[in-house]
């Protein structure tokens, strides 16, 4: 085959040296003296790169020749630019367009800056020329059976954290890494930290049809003077179209060096053996090639460990088949079977949806709970797919509010309490909201302990919502998307008053990590396929080895055979669930020779659910108090005399 001739395209325009760029790399790339700009535009379009000096405010336009075009992509390289003081845009047919692939954004350094609501305010692309030494940074690649996830909003998690660092920033979050590590967290998930516009302009106060929960009213034509404009809101969560290649500057203590600060956060997490997962929302109209480029960019340039994808009709098959992303954890609502085949060498796919929380809430709060559905969720695991389990998240009640409110209270959102789901499966246990009644508070704490145990004893990957470990409340708001205030922030003043809850969670996480049979990476077979004496998992009711005939009989025993754990030397674990309002008894299978069953966790013990002196159980039965969970281990029988 003959060698292809590459044309010499170097030119001089407006006292600048230019040449044909690299069509394969969208946005800006810097190599030596050359800065390349690549963007979408047709050959017939009139195109310029518009540069502006921040210090002098002088503007320079560099024409992009029509021949610097491949398909509908234009690319030009410009020599000798002093990027530190420049911002840029593209001009296409006389209209300024911001680079959707800009690595930095100039104009959003201040969070919720009201001056940006003016129509004349401009936001521009900027150049990320900050160097960062990763040293010997290595992604931890924590196996799914060892993962404990913790989802947080950088601003909301740190605004009231009491640290010395600037609140609401990556730096403040770095100061909380020791807290998260002590809790037992291995993987943090960050709500959007790429650039987005948090200021929502005023609009007519009309709710979309899909969130109208009340009966639809007959449409009427109203005079213009009766139509009110809703006040502007803060897009606090960031689930809007964004600048997918730029770190959010207002989340940095030093907004002009946001990329460096975010890299430092990830580096610090890796030093502590922890992972960072980014949540990214892509509306349906976003170009699929841009999505792939963005994911590769964060993995390559920021060493992120995983991406939680939000949005419909995303190029999932292309994402999971991409070689650069093959060891990056990908979280999504579902995956096609052919996509799963690509993850067999290194399981990196995780199903992430609300499938777990509703059956668990129904059982917890006595709302048509079904023990068969509950048991299925507790043992949910895939051979090549992981499952993310959570009971509370940003989209809904906090864990504390789940036991304090029957109904949502979203009036602060300014949408007549019509936004947010009305299907919460919550229970206030007698009083709507906070109360001083001791028996109600005791019942709420009991259910909180039950929820934590259920989540951490489930086979899939547990995920905690930030602040749930310390009783964080949003006052019944189950859709705090615009609450950039104490309603939407973690209240760190609760840390001291909820010390026992935090310690309980630490103990449960440690118990899960010590008893790896609970988080077995492979699905249970309900058989003793290794001839070890017990099936890997078995169910028990009032009689051993037998379930109750009706699924609404809300008690169940689950026996995990410790010999099927990865180290094959773990004790057997029996988890006894009673969600009835009365005491009940469950049968215990006969322990192995020389062993006895002992109770080591009892959620009914408010002050010491982890028993200092485990209680032996004999007679083949265990009596459970109302609405309690007990965890038993098989241990060596103590010899007397």
Image: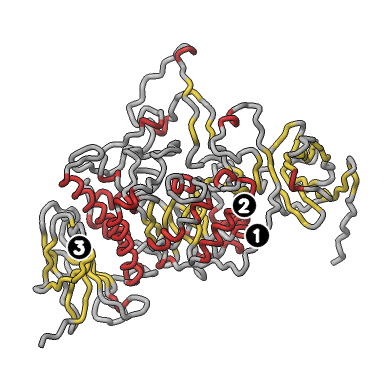
SS type, badge 1: loop
Tell me residue 522's x, y (percent).
Answer: 38, 69
Q: In percent of the image, x 19 and y 43: which residue is there?
A: 429
In the rendered picture of this protein, how many numbered marks are placed on residues? Answer: 3
For residue 566, side relative to residue 577 (left or right): right
Extreme-bottom residue of the structure: 641
Q: Is residue 52 visible in this depiction of the protein?
A: no
Q: In the image, is residue 117 above or below residue 198?
A: above
Q: Which circle's residue, 2 or 1, is located before the other in the chain?
A: 1
Q: In the image, is residue 518 above or below residue 466?
A: below
Cα distance between the residues tagged 2 and 3: 47 Å
Q: How is the image coloured?
A: secondary structure
Cα distance between the residues tagged 1 and 3: 49 Å
For residue 369, side relative to residue 116 (left or right): left
Cα distance between the residues tagged 2 and 1: 9 Å
Tell me residue 491's x, y (percent).
Answer: 37, 45
Kindly identify which residue carries mark 3: 602
Tell me residue 241's x, y (percent).
Answer: 56, 40
Q: Is residue 168 visible in this depiction of the protein?
A: yes
Kindly identify which residue carries mark 2: 259
Q: In the image, is residue 49 above or below residue 301?
A: above
Kindly identify which residue carries mark 1: 132
Of residues 333 and 364, the one nearer the viewer is 364
């Amino acid at each position: 085959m003959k060698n292809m001739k590459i044309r010499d395209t170097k030119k001089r325009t407006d006292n600048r040296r230019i040449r044909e760029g690299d069509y394969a790399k969208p946005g800006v790339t810097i190599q030596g003296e050359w800065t390349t700009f690549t963007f979408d535009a047709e050959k017939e379009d009139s195109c310029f790169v518009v540069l502006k000096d921040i210090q002098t405010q002088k503007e320079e336009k560099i024409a992009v020749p029509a021949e610097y075009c491949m398909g509908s992509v234009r690319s030009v390289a410009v020599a000798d630019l002093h990027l530190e003081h420049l911002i840029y845009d593209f001009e296409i047919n006389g209209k300024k367009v911001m680079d959707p692939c800009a690595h930095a954004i100039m104009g959003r350094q201040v969070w919720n800056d009201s001056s940006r609501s003016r129509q004349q305010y401009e936001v521009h692309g900027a150049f990320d020329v900050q160097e960062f030494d990763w040293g010997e940074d290595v992604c931890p690649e924590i196996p799914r059976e060892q993962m404990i996830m913790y989802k947080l909003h950088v601003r909301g998690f740190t605004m009231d954290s009491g640290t010395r660092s600037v609140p609401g920033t990556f730096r403040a979050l770095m100061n909380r890494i020791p807290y998260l590590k002590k809790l037992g967290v291995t993987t943090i998930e960050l709500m959007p930290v790429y650039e987005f516009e948090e200021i929502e302009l005023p609009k007519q106060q009309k709710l979309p049809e899909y969130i109208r929960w009340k009966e639809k009213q007959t449409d009427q034509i109203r005079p213009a003077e009766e139509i009110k404009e809703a006040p502007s809101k803060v897009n606090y969560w960031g689930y809007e179209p964004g600048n997918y290649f730029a770190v959010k500057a207002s989340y940095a203590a030093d907004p002009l060096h946001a990329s460096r600060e975010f890299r430092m956060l990830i580096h610090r997490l890796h030093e502590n053996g922890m992972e960072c997962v980014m949540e990214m929302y892509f509306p349906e109209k976003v170009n699929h090639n841009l999505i792939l480029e963005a994911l590769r960019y964060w993995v390559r340039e920021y060493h992120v460990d995983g991406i939680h994808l939000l949005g419909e009709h995303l190029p999932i098959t292309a994402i999971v088949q991409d070689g650069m992303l093959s060891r990056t954890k990908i979280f999504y609502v579902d995956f096609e079977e052919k996509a799963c085949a690509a993850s067999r060498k290194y399981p990196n796919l995780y199903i992430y949806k609300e499938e777990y929380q509703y059956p668990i809430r129904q059982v917890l709060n006595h709302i048509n709970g079904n023990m068969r559905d509950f048991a299925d969720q507790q043992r949910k695991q895939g051979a090549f797919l992981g499952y993310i389990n959570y009971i509370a998240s940003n989209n809904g009640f906090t864990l504390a509010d789940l036991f304090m409110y029957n109904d949502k209270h979203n009036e602060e959102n300014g949408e007549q309490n019509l936004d947010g789901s009305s299907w919460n499966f919550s229970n206030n246990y007698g009083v709507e909201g906070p109360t001083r009644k001791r028996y109600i508070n005791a019942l709420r704490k009991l259910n909180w302990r039950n929820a934590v145990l259920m989540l951490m004893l489930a086979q899939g990957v547990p995920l905690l919502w930030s602040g749930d470990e310390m009783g964080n409340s949003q006052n019944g708001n189950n859709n705090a998307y615009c609450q950039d205030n104490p309603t939407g922030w973690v209240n760190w003043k609760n840390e001291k008053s909820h010390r026992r809850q935090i310690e309980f969670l630490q103990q449960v996480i440690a118990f899960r990590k010590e008893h790896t049979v609970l988080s077995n990476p492979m699905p249970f077979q309900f058989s003793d396929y290794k001839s070890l004496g017990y099936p890997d998992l078995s169910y028990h009711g009032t009689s051993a080895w037998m379930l109750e005939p009706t699924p609404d009989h809300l008690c169940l025993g689950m026996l995990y055979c410790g010999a099927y754990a990865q180290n094959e030397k773990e004790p057997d674990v029996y988890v006894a669930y009673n969600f009835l309002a009365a005491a009940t008894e469950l049968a215990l299978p006969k322990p192995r020779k020389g062993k006895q069953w002992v109770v080591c966790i009892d959620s009914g013990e408010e002050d010491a659910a982890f028993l200092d002196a485990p209680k032996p159980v004999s007679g083949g039965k265990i009596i459970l108090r109302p609405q309690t969970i007990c965890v038993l281990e098989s241990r060596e029988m103590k010899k007397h005399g």
